[in-house]
Image (cartoon, rainbow, N blue to C red):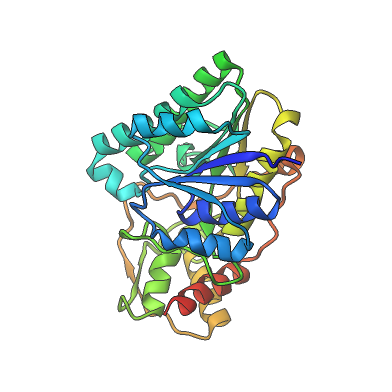
Amino acid sequence: MVKQKVLVTGGAGFIGSHTCVELLDNDFDVHVIDNFSNAKPDVIRRIEAVANQPLTCFNLDLRDKPGLKEIFSAHTYTAIIHFAGLKAVGESVQMPLHYYQHNLEILMNLLENKAEQTSFIFSSSATVYDTKKDAPYNETDPLSPINPYGQTKLMAETILKDVCSITKTKLIILRYFNPMGAHPSGIIGEAPQVNPNNLMPYILEVASKVRARLYIFGDDYKTPDGTGCRDYIHVVDLAQAHVKAVTLTNQLPSSNIFNLGTGKSTSVLELLAMFERENKIDIPYEIAERRQGDAANVYADVTLANQELGWFAKYTIADMCRDAYRFIQNRK
């Protein structure tokens, strides 16, 4: 039986690499496009080691139209899972034009080249929601991103809906909350090549003595301990949701949006205490001023993903803390 061929853009990144493992484990023929701007090429070897299967990798920037056309001329894909793009919120505020140009250009290049029958699964974000509304957030809640990164995700969603409705392409938009953790093997995990954009990499840098302390931005929010609360989801749970999306595409409506989270929130101090307890290590921290635009409490309503995809997050905060630290320890 011929395997279904899936293209994963940004497949060497944090979420992309874990998704490639899950796809390989579920007997898909996986092709990756990555320019390795925020990941090392050896991630491909690590993916293959975890899955004990080969994949096909193209070292290509998605702005390279001739190179992209050559790939699509040679291969027909069941689905495209689009992770590639710039994703640092703070950087997007400093370089908005760069973010708009890059993230929207690469999306449109993909859409210009893909076959009509190829379904499209898009890596979106909870940053599209209007955080002035109280959590939890469901897929029909108001949208109002507060930074250029979130705006590019919302613009991409709009482009995809317009284009896919005309071409009759099956579309699945997955809005992530806060991915964390690493593969339980300790072989792949989060290893950004630029400044971290999430809480856990900063904790890991303190644990590894790269940083002296962790800065916690604000302790006066209306939350149980005053620190911000977020919906942290294990990256393997997240990856498995993408396999569900690819597998069930033909059973779903033409256009779909699903939140991916656990449906509950954890504060910064709760996460820090769990990390220290599970890994038997102290993480010095200092309270700093709030960052502009940070919400007090953000978590997902995941009812739709549970019902339509049959997907449920299984890993705990303790699992995320252990797996993330194991990966860093293995890299030493």
Residue 108 locus on image (x, y percent): 41, 26
Residue 50 locus on image (x, y percent): 60, 65
Image quadrant in which you'd find residue 215: bottom left
Up/down of 220 relative to 164, above or below: below
- Say which of 224 and 150 sits in front: 150
Residue 319 locus on image (x, y percent): 62, 70
How many numbered marks are there?
Answer: 0
- Say which of 34 and 16 sits in front: 34
The residue that appears at 43% across and 63% down in the rendered structure is: 42
306 to the left or right of 76: right
Residue 5 locus on image (x, y percent): 62, 39
| Rendered-image quadrant of the N terminus | top right
Up/down of 49 relative to 139, above or below: below
* Residue 132 visible in the current orientation: yes
Image quadrant in which you'd find residue 197: bottom left
229 to the left or right of 86: right
Q: Residue furthest top?
A: 166
- Say which of 31 and 316 sits in front: 31
| Rendered-image quadrant of the C terminus | bottom left
The residue that appears at 50% across and 25% down in the rendered structure is: 160
Up/down of 179 relative to 247, above or below: below
* Residue 134 visible in the current orientation: no
The residue that appears at 62% across and 23% down in the rendered structure is: 117
